[in-house]
Amino acid sequence: MLARVSLPTSSRVYFPKWYLKGTRASPASAGATVAAAKYINLDMRSYLNFLSWMPAALKMPDDELIQHAGLDSVVYLRIYRTGLKIFVPITILAFAVLVPLNWTNDTLETLKVVHSDIDKLSISNIPYGSKRFIAHLVMAYVFTFWTCYILMKEYQIVAKMRLRFLASEKRRPDQFTVLVRNIPSDPDESVSELVEHFFLVNHPGHYLKHQVVYNTNKLAGLVEKKKQMQNWLDYYQLKFERKAERPTTKTGFFGCSGSDVDAIDYYKSEIEKIGKEEADEHKKVMKDPKSIMPAAFVSFRSRWGAAVAAQTQQTSNPTVWLTEWAPEPRDVYWNNLSIPFVSLTVRRLIIGVAFFFLNFFYVIPIAFVQTLANVEGIEKALPFLEPFIETIPRIIGVAIPIKATFFITYVMVDGWTGVALEVLRLKAFIMFHLKNFFLVKTEKDREEAMDPGSICLYWSEPRIQLYFLLGLVYAVVTPLLLPFILVFFALAYVVYRHQIINVYNQRYESGAQFWPNVHLRIITALIVSQLLLLGLLSTKGLEEATPALLALPVLTIWFHKYCKHRYEPAFVRNPLQEVMRKDTLERARERNFDLKAYLADAYLHPVFKSNEAGKFYVADDPGAEAVIVPTKRQSRRITPVQSEDGGSGRLNLMESVHKR
Amino acid sequence: MLARVSLPTSSRVYFPKWYLKGTRASPASAGATVAAAKYINLDMRSYLNFLSWMPAALKMPDDELIQHAGLDSVVYLRIYRTGLKIFVPITILAFAVLVPLNWTNDTLETLKVVHSDIDKLSISNIPYGSKRFIAHLVMAYVFTFWTCYILMKEYQIVAKMRLRFLASEKRRPDQFTVLVRNIPSDPDESVSELVEHFFLVNHPGHYLKHQVVYNTNKLAGLVEKKKQMQNWLDYYQLKFERKAERPTTKTGFFGCSGSDVDAIDYYKSEIEKIGKEEADEHKKVMKDPKSIMPAAFVSFRSRWGAAVAAQTQQTSNPTVWLTEWAPEPRDVYWNNLSIPFVSLTVRRLIIGVAFFFLNFFYVIPIAFVQTLANVEGIEKALPFLEPFIETIPRIIGVAIPIKATFFITYVMVDGWTGVALEVLRLKAFIMFHLKNFFLVKTEKDREEAMDPGSICLYWSEPRIQLYFLLGLVYAVVTPLLLPFILVFFALAYVVYRHQIINVYNQRYESGAQFWPNVHLRIITALIVSQLLLLGLLSTKGLEEATPALLALPVLTIWFHKYCKHRYEPAFVRNPLQEVMRKDTLERARERNFDLKAYLADAYLHPVFKSNEAGKFYVADDPGAEAVIVPTKRQSRRITPVQSEDGGSGRLNLMESVHKR
């Protein structure tokens, strides 16, 4: 706990979330500190007492936690809670039933395989063809049913939390907006005109405005580069102020080669050069039609209109005019918006094939070598067993459970230590103090330096899943692994709860949209565990149990399908009743709200927002009066055209007819 | 061709479709005969010439055939055409490359296995571990790519045909209608009130009317029984008229036991009794709220409104208020409309488990016994081989291809003969003449007797798929089977084309909605063939080819996913652009069309339609004026209620607020 014994300024490393809350809600700055004092002990000295922060972390009720850190964080914590809920009863049952059954045999003694006492608690200690395996079979069923039951309950709770969260949410731009991708190209109209015409015609009365997406990858790169240069300039200016001597730098490779120049002048000129490039690029992006991507954010007059557009197919060609619920603005990954449909499909194929061959060429030989290694080990230790080792399946039944000791070590090293490091935030601690020492000049700089980061779901979620997999696979085989998994889940739950309350600041809010993935992965782990048990028992002389064991994955897959059908829509679709309710309430409360102004900049690329020239696209209001959509297609004004690409060819008749 | 040498009246058996066309389009009756004469030779004598009908069947162009018999029939024929397209090049290639390769070996001679000359053309004739298997491997790739290419082209063509068909379709009730299932029960409102309120609130401006679904299973049974009794009465009255002697019948078991009674009096009284029961049941159905099922057909003011309702989720609970595109009225299977969601899920589970265990307990032992039988046969014939027959995999590589002779016989007996019987229509021929002799009194009776039936897709489509499976499995293994498959496809194509033009009368039109299933099954056959080849080659000493062969099913599955994503939506969803185009055109052409009157009876159970009391449900027009939806819920008029079942609890606030 050494890192925690520190200057008061370290509270910015260990409780940055509260500072952010305070500085953000500036009028109520004091409020945040008071609220913080309610849940955390701001007196640093008390942290000398080992683990005194733990009970504090558990105090905050869920509803308040959602208010404080968002639903994503709270549901992320639920993954650990789900782990506890699944594994606590499984551990108790396994220790009550399976451990005594395994212990009271002497197969390993008789076989004289190299083994530890731990292995005597595992399934390997049961003799070939023993009737005792029926207990393992029954337990496999019990564990599967219990896991599925908890998974269903959790899915239900998370879905309910999500629905309540969405219902209670304030007005947000993504509620009114749909992301349209693969807009077909049109010889007569620009993307912007095409989008406007398409939605005016096909969603009359609902369409409000749209925002085309620009290919700003180069521009964003320039902005980023300029920022870096600015950083260097600041650094050298600081150095100059301190040392009163003009610093120099080298212009070559990472400032390591080339001739010496005055650093401040050099970076000033560089910044100026990039600034000019940036302005040119900015102009080019806005003028060149090629820099407009075939994608747009289309906003509607009501949530109902957006929900309808997001859930329906627009044209007979299902690869163009693809609509989906827009992510919230901060959650948009701009660089990827331009990837065309074909490219996406091909990328998926390549990944699929690569995944397949990686598994094929990696897992199979590894398993083969592992088996060989074990067999050789046994041959060396027990040369008289050689005749039995030949075409060797029984050995597998011994080898797999013995691997458990390795995984126990792994859980302790990777799981326990990882969690401990997480709470110590060593890297953040060092970085903050380094930055503080070298770079921080103003309060704004300090804020940037103490950026607490957010939980990287794409990184930490699969890691938890490994523990689910280990727990489920070894629950029947070597129950001794279970307590280690339990300690990991409990520790991680408390630690991450503390971190979420005091440290992390989620950058965006998806409303727990990741839960279906969590569910699917636990189900996959369950099926893997069932198949491994099937293979294991078939090498232990229990072939007749195969049908009973094969039924398990079938039932599990059916359960998954049921859950997917029952709960997944809550995470993907936007039910009309809910949005209609919100629309109606809002219309009754704020009759004259200017939605258009509210949505004006919402889906503008951040690079434009930082710029004065940002508001360059202002669409005319296709207001409540009658609108006749103009068309540029002189030649096709009267005949309806059958176009095959689902493009705008068909619009023209309606364009001339349609009024609203 | 004996059956075809018959009285002119047989034309009613062999060309009933033209009679139906004639009698239906009564003013243009002559027109149908003229049209018939264009494509078929109505002069019966010419049919003495063997197969003279064949070229006639091939004359009609596709567009006219769609007009004549509907898209379903035309696309059904495409299945055979797809078979030809896939197998003609495969056959040529297999005979050019594989047959010579197989023939120029003497493995079967050397092994002295019991074999025919046919087997010498198969893969079994290639020695263990030969390099020649590489040719089979390459051919497996070529065949897979060719099959996938044809499948994709066909999917594309059928999707286009469907879209064109839907676009050209006249106004049909199902275009405006959505089937709503799992309407939650409500203590305050009837199903009908609930449906009206729900859609008025959540689809304001679009909802037009609805038709609740009654549980008429008992009533329909009574109507059917009465019809049967009427039939018997007609029969005995005819008998009486002819013999001038009152016929008697027995009242017991199927008229075989019990006391003799006057048949005409007996059936008259029975009909009266059932008629009374029917009237009582009719009253009960209409009064008892329990006879109203939680399902309804909801119609909208525009196709756009219906398309939106069918494609969106209505409430946060995805198991209630399920909406889907309504089938066309004649295609509704009324008995099944009442099955609740849970029951459906459980039924699917039971079928899934049953399917699994059927396969498990059936296929595996059969395969085992088959293998044993072969091995024993070999042992008897070649006792010196016994030592090699022991843990026996190489034999499988010989046994599977040898089964080809059995399947060649099967194709000839089941496939060829089945098709020949189809064109002879022996059963229909006999039945028609029997009925004509015994029952037909008036022209109307004759019409009923000559009911040509329709193609049973659920029965004949899986049968075709068997031939796809056989063809794909044996394409690489025993190419000699291919010509037999080709003859089947060619024959069946011509015969069914003839039957569709001249005989069958499809009862309803789904617009080729079955094509995704056809596609999926051919893909499945392809994957089965790839896995079998994998197993086969691994027993022939070509284990190193396994990764190359494993890639095939992976690629095929990916191809299926791609096709599903690309083309399936055209068969499931209703794109907004298309419906909007139809709506707009129609609104411009027929400004004052009374849609409500048009839809009034469309989705009424047929049992009510035959009845005078049919039009008993007339909803009030929630017309174009302002509508305030009344609510019966006194207690909850003001507070919005959070209900968990997604029921109508949430409506009340909107109901009092909502105006349009």
Image (spheres, coloured by chain):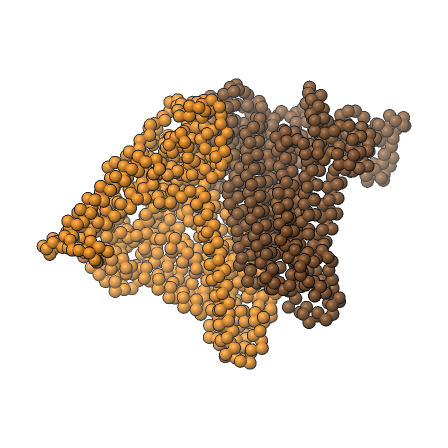
Chain colours: A orange, B brown
Find residue A224 and report its horizontal and vertical position in percent.
Answer: 26, 47
Residue B430 visible, this angle:
no
Q: Is residue A548 left or right of residue A66?
A: right
Residue at left offset 67%, top offset 61%? B105
Most foreground residue, A536 or B12: B12
Along the line of sight, the residue nearer the viewer: A137 or B536? B536
The residue lying at 70 percent from left, 58 percent from top is B120
Residue A581 percent location from the top left of the image: 42, 34
Relative placement, left or right, of B571 versus A56 is right
Whether residue B416 is visible here, answered yes or no, is yes
Which residue is rendered at x = 32% and y = 56% of the image?
A498
Q: Quadrant of the C terminus of chain A?
A: top left
Q: Which residue, as the protein is rendered here, is positioned at the far left?
A: A244
Location of residue A212 by image quarter = top left
- Report which quarter residue B239 is drawn in: top right
Q: Nearer the viewer, residue B568 or B424?
A: B424
Residue A436: give x, y in percent of width and height. Answer: 20, 55
Q: Position of residue B78 (x, y in %)?
A: 63, 39
Query: Which residue does the image show at 65% across and 38% down from the upper left?
Result: B77
